[in-house]
Image (spheres, rainbow, N blue to C red):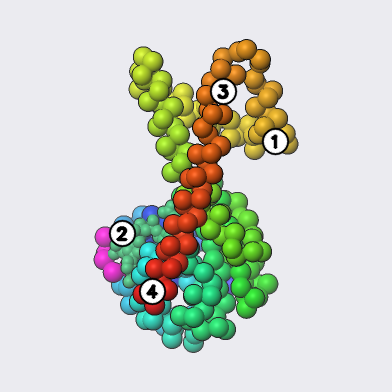
Amino acid sequence: MTEPQIVFIGAGNMARALISGMRQQGIAGPNIQVHAPSNLHRGALAEEFGVRSCPAQAEKLPENSVVIYAAKPKQMPAVLKEWRDSLRSASALFVSVAAGISSAQITTLLGEETPVVRAMPNTPAQIGAGATSLFATATVSANQCDTVQQIFAGVGKVFWLHDEALMDTATALAGSGPAYVLLFLEALEDAAVLQGLDRVTARALALQTVLGTAQMAAANSASPSELRHQVTSPGGTTAAGLAVWEEQLRPLAQRALAAAAERGRILSQLLKTTA
Ligand SMILES: NC(=O)c1ccc[n+]([C@@H]2O[C@H](COP(=O)([O-])OP(=O)(O)OC[C@H]3O[C@@H](n4cnc5c(N)ncnc54)[C@H](OP(=O)(O)O)[C@@H]3O)[C@@H](O)[C@H]2O)c1
């Protein structure tokens, strides 16, 4: 397969994570172009990863292009108005990582015939450890699905969803998830410091515990619940700590995912009112 030209609209955190992963997977720098208004982020990406840095304006796209929208959701109507003709004339595949924006909203902006994939990656993509949920509209061909699969599998694990409504949940879980895990690390570290451990050791212990446990769970066919029971002796220290977590953690997780999913729906509504 000829390597597609990958065009990023947006040069921020998510574009950086994906480009970093793609370059590590051997996609050549000149096959990636990055469009953004200021040179600040795209210039840095060009310097670091050898990608082509371009102003925000739309340009003529080669056939077989994959355009990845990685600017903010609310900017999409204005940006796509400018890109619509180039996308149409190249029959480009449009991939959106914008949280909350539905494929129907995108095809309203670009035309019903535009092949659209919604992707929800997360920032561990920058070290090849991302989790990306994907949803393809009916106009996306099997070959185009393979191309998208190849791009995102290069930066971590890929999960295809067949019900677009669940993209908001996938976003709330995995798109926003790294920040939850980082908050959990901070909280563990702070709690250990409060008990007298020095910060450097507390941070390293918390990090290695979360990392080691995630690796252990990934390497094991048992469920997290089964593994947890294996390490919890009745009346022991773990049981004492778990009793406290159990009081709050599940309702908190439900509220956090509900709030994040709702925010995705609000972002989508905002787009409707500005389109
Ligand atoms: N961050 C995450 O963890 C995460 C996870 C999943 C999905 N997402 C999605 O990824 C998208 C980007 O998020 P982010 O965190 O990477 O945002 P960000 O760091 O704020 O980056 C936004 C980028 O968009 C560029 N931009 C602004 N106006 C533009 C225009 N008219 N044309 C082209 N580019 C334009 C900005 O340009 P300048 O460089 O000139 O400022 C900047 O490079 C969002 O839709 C978000 O929902 C993010």
Residue at mark 2 to residue at mark 3: CA–CA distance: 46 Å
Which numbered mark, 1 or 3, is in the foreground of this view? 3
Secondary structure of the residue carrying tag 1 is: loop
Q: Nearer the viewer, residue 133 or 148?
A: 133
Looking at the image, residue 266 lies above or below residue 194: below
**Quadrant hosting ligand 1:** bottom left
Secondary structure of the residue carrying tag 3 is: helix
Q: Nearer the viewer, residue 184 or 221?
A: 184
- Assess whether residue 40 is covered by the magenta stretch: yes
Residue at mark 4 to residue at mark 3: CA–CA distance: 46 Å
Indicate the quadrant where residue 235 lies. top right
Write down the residue under mark 3. Answer: 243
Q: Nearer the viewer, residue 134 or 147?
A: 134
Write down the residue under mark 4. Answer: 273
Write down the residue under mark 2. Answer: 41
Q: Position of residue 245 (x, y in %)?
A: 53, 28
Mark seen at residue 223? 1
